[in-house]
């Protein structure tokens, strides 16, 4: 009898994931002037030790002015490589594949951390490169209206901006990452070019749908020129942004990007109008899965589902129904970093806990074999079920 698909290996190019559980990139806002800290090592490491097949580190900025907050990770200089390599080595040591997302905040840069309110920053002595931290975008349009107005990138500046993505991809490879995810979603710079809501240019990067895609396409070409052909390339899209960019446009873009070397579409939504998410229906379990379903089946490309995927049987059903190829979790992994290990037990596989390091596996397997009456805490609310 075949086992659960969630724990079947999957090979993409020359990289094999031991299971289909992916740690989605989550901003930590904990970097120091762009450098990775001990927090990044611990945060990424706990997910690798928890059994995930792929750990994608947070959106790491391709240039200084692309930083969303003072705590964003950077990869616009070779000096950032050693700190990230430290994280890569630990992830790989625990039999997980290390990945990284590359991003640029565009007009959503230079802000307080979310738990500090997320409002635009003001000049202060603590920020010694304020003038270099310029807000740029596809067009000189602010969002929401109370935000500072960005400067539109000139036609002459765009090739340099594109090349920064390629150079960041080179550095990601040198740091040892095996999977790269380009952030084209959530109202950030590439999305600002894609959406007619934020792009009102009248040159070859604006106007028609294909023109608005041009920046994204050139970024992929630049990244692929510096990212080894043996390594997978993902793209995260806001498949529906409720602002003029939707599933039809996302499918069309995916069909263009696939022959240029994109392997997986990471399917999210929203972010253009300031709201965190937008959905065709209520925000509930698996609310963004229809986007992964649409991209996988209409664009003929591997897709990754994300968005309130919480339970093991829920994740397994998505795969069994052919709606996605990978399952990404974010906040549920914050709640339980050992979710992959826990899911394997609930789906009846990995009786010896081989998906996690021996220092965990030995003791958990011993308890499971010797004390049959113990139910893990993730299976029930308390000792007595009411």
Image (cartoon, rainbow, N blue to C red):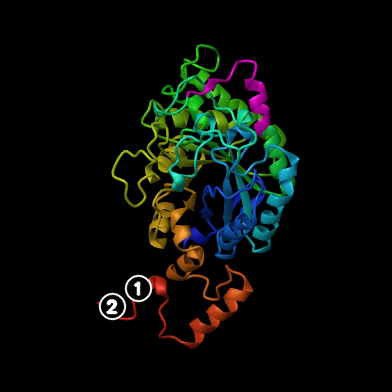
> Relative to residue 27, is residue 196 depicted above or below?
above
Mark sitting on residue 380: 1
Please tell me in which quadrant of the rendered image residue 104 appears: top right
Name the outermost residue toward the top: 202
Crowdedness near tag 2: few (<14), some (14–19) or many (≥20) residues, C-alpha within 10 Å:
few
Name the outermost residue toward the bottom: 370
Residue 295 belongs to magenta span? no
Marks 1 and 2, how far apart at CA? 7 Å
Q: Earlier in the sequence, mark 1 or mark 2?
A: 1
Please tell me in which quadrant of the rendered image residue 363 appears: bottom right
User: Residue 240 location in percent, x, y?
Assistant: 39, 34
Q: Please tell me whether mark 1 sits on a helix, a strand or a loop.
A: loop
Q: Residue at x 57, y 63 (%)?
A: 46
User: Residue 133 location in percent, x, y?
Assistant: 60, 31
Q: Residue at x 58, y 43 (%)?
A: 72
Residues drawn in magenta: 149-165
Q: Is residue 104 left or right of residue 146?
A: right
Q: Please tell me whether mark 2 sits on a helix, a strand or a loop.
A: loop
User: Residue 158 location in percent, x, y?
Assistant: 62, 21
* Residue that badge 2 annotates: 385
């Amino acid at each position: 009898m075949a086992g659960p698909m969630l724990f079947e290996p999957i090979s993409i190019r020359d990289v094999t994931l031991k299971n289909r559980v992916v740690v989605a990139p989550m901003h930590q806002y904990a970097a120091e002037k762009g450098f990775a800290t001990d927090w990044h090592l611990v945060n990424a490491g706990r997910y690798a030790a928890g059994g995930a097949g792929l750990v994608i580190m947070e959106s790491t900025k391709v240039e200084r002015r692309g930083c969303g907050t003072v705590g964003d990770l950077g990869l616009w200089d070779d000096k950032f490589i050693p700190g990230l390599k430290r994280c890569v080595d630990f992830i790989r040591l625990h039999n997980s594949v290390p990945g990284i997302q590359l991003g640029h905040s565009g007009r959503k840069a230079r802000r307080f951390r979310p738990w500090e309110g997320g409002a635009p920053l003001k000049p202060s002595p603590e920020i010694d490169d304020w003038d270099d931290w310029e807000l740029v975008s596809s067009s000189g349009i602010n969002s929401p209206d109370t935000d500072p107005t960005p400067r539109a990138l000139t036609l002459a500046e765009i090739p340099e901006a594109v090349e920064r993505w390629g150079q960041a991809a080179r550095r990601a490879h040198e740091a040892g990452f095996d999977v790269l995810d380009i952030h084209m979603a959530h109202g950030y710079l590439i999305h600002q070019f894609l959406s007619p809501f934020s792009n009102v240019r009248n040159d070859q990067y604006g106007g028609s749908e294909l023109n608005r895609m041009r920046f994204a396409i050139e970024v992929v070409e630049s990244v692929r020129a510096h990212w080894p052909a043996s390594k997978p390339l993902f793209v995260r899209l806001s498949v529906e942004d409720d602002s003029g960019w939707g599933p039809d446009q996302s499918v069309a873009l995916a069909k263009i990007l696939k022959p240029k070397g994109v392997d997986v579409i990471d399917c999210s939504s929203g972010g253009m109008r300031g709201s965190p998410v937008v959905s065709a229906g209520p925000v509930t379990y698996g609310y963004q899965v229809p986007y992964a379903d649409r991209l996988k089946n209409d664009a003929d490309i591997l897709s990754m589902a994300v968005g309130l995927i919480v339970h093991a049987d829920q994740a397994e059903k998505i795969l069994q129904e052919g709606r996605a190829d990978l399952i990404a979790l974010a906040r549920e992994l914050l709640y339980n970093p050992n979710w992959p290990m826990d899911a394997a037990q609930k789906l009846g596989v990995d009786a010896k806990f081989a998906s996690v390091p021996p220092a965990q596996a030995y003791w958990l397997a011993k308890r499971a074999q010797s004390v049959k009456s113990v139910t893990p805490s993730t299976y029930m609310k308390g000792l007595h079920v009411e």
